[in-house]
């Protein structure tokens, strides 16, 4: 199957009249075999791609979303652990790697289908379709405030409940009793009739060989033991004691630093760069032309920043150079006026008789609201550490889409996606900005020019000029 575009993905699943028609059918199943080599140690059993049970009866939950302060590592783990009846005190949370089996099919399914409840016999096929599509598109996205609604409900709770069901089945077969006679509590299986009690670890290997249902019975809210409680967030201790690793904290032996000066106008490219004034500056190692930006590598960020401020760059001319905010708002206003005259406005919500209300009003109040293009201004500066070595490119950064970044960087370097290794870190703010791969691509291209790791850091000025802005509105 070739790479899908986002448009093809959305139009392949046609949503109409409460039904969904798919042009592709493939069952998702339990793809543990594809990830177990790098996800499981000798003392662990992987029950599904989201869950591992240790021989010490510990539970490791794999969360497919980035932690950027919203608490998603804790929340999604709680949802799985509750359905599993796990002992929360023995739960460890890890973030899913940038691997295609962790593409976010649940988020895509929720967005496209709008929460349609499918017949049980179709759920695995529906999940398989969306996994196939998101794998092809490299969507491992954290965004849209949908992690709990879609990933939590459609993936994490299901994974926990399915794992609990096969653990009960394995215990029932081992003890020679009916599964209906067994109960679970804090990572243990209990047979009340004989007072037997054993840890999940005792049955994990047997349970892993059993088929898991994509539509297990989920708990009702009155059965929750972890969801709805106020447990300490798993990311807070490290953030308090300073051991939390954000992208900008990455330190690789032999690493040097880089910063960039990008074209002041979108669409412009480098015509000429005069690097002579800085090549003899202390700590400066290399100047690299990235076409739409110039990069300087130095021993430290400040040395690179001082150097790049003195570089003289000539940029190409573009029509955008003469455009300003007032022109944009004038265009918006003209478009709105034209749409009003032509009756071509798109109504998102229509309630009541507006014309009649205006006609009968004693007083009419008019207001116009304008919001300009705004940068996300994340607290952590935009950064990425890249190391090109042994036909690989390793990246250390905080990203909202690790799998997507690996595909974008691979395309920029003209290498296979599996040659790009993303070490995702905590994000010092995301808000959608860290779903765009521009900084990672720049870092990879810079690192490809040298034989040592390079940490690229954007200045605040560059961040403001070259954000992927929130749209202007009127």
Image: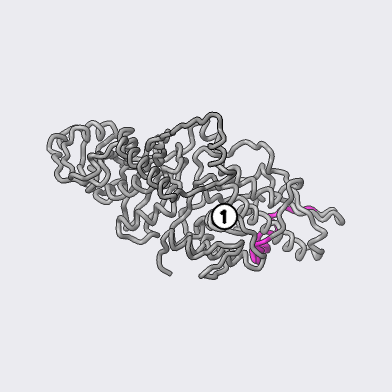
Q: Nearer the viewer, residue 202 or 441?
A: 441
Toward which corner of the image does residue 22 lie, by quadrant?
A: bottom right
Toward which corner of the image does residue 298 lie, by quadrant?
A: top left
Residue 319 position, x and y percent, is 22, 45
Local crowd size for mark 1, using a 10 Å CA cut-off: few (<14), some (14–19), many (≥20): some
The structure residue drawn at horizontal position 73% and vertical position 52%, both measured from the top left corner, is: 219
Q: Nearer the viewer, residue 346 or 311?
A: 346
Task: Tell me where the magenta segment starts and ends, as one range.
Answer: 197-215
The structure residue drawn at horizontal position 28% and vertical position 40%, both measured from the top left corner, is: 258
Left or right of 288, for residue 33: right
Left or right of 274, for residue 249: right
- The structure's colour scheme is one colour
Residue 331 position, x and y percent, is 33, 42
Residue 213: within the magenta?
Answer: yes
Which residue is denoted by mark 1 in the rendering?
110
Query: Does the image show residue 252?
Result: no
Instruction: Name the quadrant of the N terminus.
Output: bottom left
**Above or below — where is 123 with respect to 320?**
below
**Above or below — where is 359 with respect to 149?**
above
Mark 1 residue element = helix
Instruction: Name the quadrant of the C terminus.
Output: top left
The structure residue drawn at horizontal position 28% and vertical position 34%, both measured from the top left corner, is: 300
Query: Does the image show residue 85?
Result: yes
Residue 433 position, x and y percent, is 41, 42
Residue 373: within the magenta?
Answer: no
Residue 237 position, x and y percent, is 56, 34
Left or right of 399, for residue 215: right
């Amino acid at each position: 199957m070739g790479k899908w575009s986002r448009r093809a993905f959305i139009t392949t699943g046609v949503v109409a009249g409460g039904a969904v028609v798919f042009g592709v059918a493939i069952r998702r199943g339990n793809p543990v075999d594809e990830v177990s080599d790098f996800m499981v140690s000798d003392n662990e059993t992987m029950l599904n791609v989201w869950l591992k049970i240790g021989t010490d009866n510990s539970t490791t939950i794999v969360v497919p979303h980035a932690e950027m302060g919203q608490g998603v590592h804790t929340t999604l783990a709680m949802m799985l652990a509750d359905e599993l009846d796990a002992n929360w005190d023995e739960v460890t949370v890890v973030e899913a790697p940038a691997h295609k089996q962790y593409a976010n099919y649940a988020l895509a399914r929720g967005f496209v289908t709008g929460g349609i409840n499918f017949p049980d016999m179709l759920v695995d096929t529906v999940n398989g379709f969306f996994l196939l599509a998101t794998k092809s598109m490299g969507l491992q996205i954290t965004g849209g405030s949908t992690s709990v609604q879609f990933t939590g409900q459609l993936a994490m709770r299901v994974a926990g409940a399915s794992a609990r069901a096969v653990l009960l089945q394995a215990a029932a077969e081992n003890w020679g009793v009916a599964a209906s006679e067994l109960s679970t509590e804090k990572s243990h299986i209990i047979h009340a009739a004989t007072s037997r009690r054993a840890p999940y670890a005792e049955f994990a290997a047997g349970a892993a060989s059993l088929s898991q249902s994509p539509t297990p019975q989920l708990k009702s809210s009155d059965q929750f033991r972890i969801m709805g409680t106020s447990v300490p967030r798993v990311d807070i201790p490290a953030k308090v004691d300073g051991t939390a690793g954000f992208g900008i904290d990455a330190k690789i032996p032999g690493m040097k630093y880089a910063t960039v000066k990008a074209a002041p106008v979108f669409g412009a490219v480098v015509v000429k760069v005069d690097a002579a004034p800085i090549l003899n500056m202390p700590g400066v190692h290399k100047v690299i032309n990235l076409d739409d930006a110039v990069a300087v590598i130095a021993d430290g960020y400040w040395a690179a920043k001082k150097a790049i401020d003195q570089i003289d760059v000539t940029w190409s001319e573009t029509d955008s150079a003469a455009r300003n905010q007032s022109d944009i708002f004038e265009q918006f206003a003209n478009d709105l006026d034209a749409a009003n005259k032509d009756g071509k406005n798109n109504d998102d919500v229509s309630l009541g008789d507006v014309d009649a209300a205006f006609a009968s009003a004693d007083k009419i109040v008019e207001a116009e609201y304008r919001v300009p293009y705004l940068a996300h201004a994340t607290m952590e500066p935009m950064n990425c550490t890249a190391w090109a070595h042994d036909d690989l490119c390793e990246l250390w950064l905080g990203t909202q889409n690790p799998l997507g970044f690996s595909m974008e960087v691979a395309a920029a370097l003209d290498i296979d996606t599996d040659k790009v290794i993303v070490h995702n870190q905590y994000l010092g703010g995301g808000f959608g900005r860290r779903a765009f791969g521009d900084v990672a691509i720049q870092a990879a291209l810079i690192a490809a020019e040298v034989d040592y790791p390079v940490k690229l850091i954007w200045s605040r000025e560059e961040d403001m000029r070259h954000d992927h802005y929130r749209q202007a509105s009127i």
